[in-house]
Amino acid sequence: MDFTEKKDRLRVLLGASRVFQRRGYAKTRMEDFVEESKIAKKTLVEYYPNKEEVLKAVADYRQTRAACKLKRIRNNQALDFSKRFVRMRKELLDVCKPSQFELWKELQDQIPEIWRMVKAKRVQIIDREIESLLDEGKKLGEFRADLRPDLFIMALIACSDAIYKWEQSPTERRANITELDNIFLYGIIRRGKKTLKSS
């Protein structure tokens, strides 16, 4: 793949990501990608023959990008553990926007095979980064030794989903997210240990 093709594909993926979040899967047409990406339809179809292939590529791109960000945070030894943990939580919340949840729900309901693919990829790359940081916290004595990363991740996703579905202002949402942080942290921190700083 040459530089021009890489650049065009990235433009399509970024544009398609915005279109899917705005319109959802069902209402999106291939022409919307052409308009948003400013790319010829012939070129688009050459790279991605249909809307489903565009969605798969967008999901793969976004998840790979999120996992890379999480890995950089986890490996940033210039920060102490608590700062890395807080940054990772904030990054995860930034990934989980209301429009993203609407699209996920649509995929679950209408295109379960793509939803399963998205979920499997998340488990494979994103959850692995979270688990690695949680394991480090256990080794350092920051978190309870019996902490189960899989349940922590499941609860985090469910709470993020609930927070964004709840009608509230961005300020109220941020306050509720901070409170959820406290609930999570008090549940995973080793007993007798002071809380990790939330900021």
Image (cartoon, helix red, strand yellow):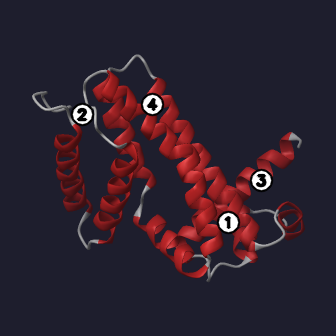
In this view of the protein, which residue sits in the foreground, 16 or 131? 131
Kindly state the secondary structure of the residue where label 1 is placed.
helix
Mark 3 vs 1, N-terminal side: 3
- At 35% across and 51% down in the image, what residue appears? 151
> Regarding mark 2 in the picture, which secondary structure is present there?
loop
Q: Nearer the viewer, residue 40 or 184?
A: 184
Question: Toward which corner of the image does residue 89 lie, by quadrant?
Answer: top left
Distance from disc 3 to disc 1, alpha carbons, whole Å, reads 13 Å
Asked whether residue 62 is in view, the answer is: yes
* Residue neighbourhood size for the residue with mark 3, other residues' Cα within 10 Å, grouped as few (<14), some (14–19), many (≥20): many
Which mark is nearer the camera, 2 or 1? 2
Give the numbered dot on residue 144.
Answer: 2
Q: Is residue 109 above or below residue 80?
A: below
Label 1, residues with CA under 10 Å away: few <14, some 14-19, many ≥20: some
Number of numbered callouts drawn:
4
Q: Who comes first in sequence, dot 4 or dot 1?
A: 1
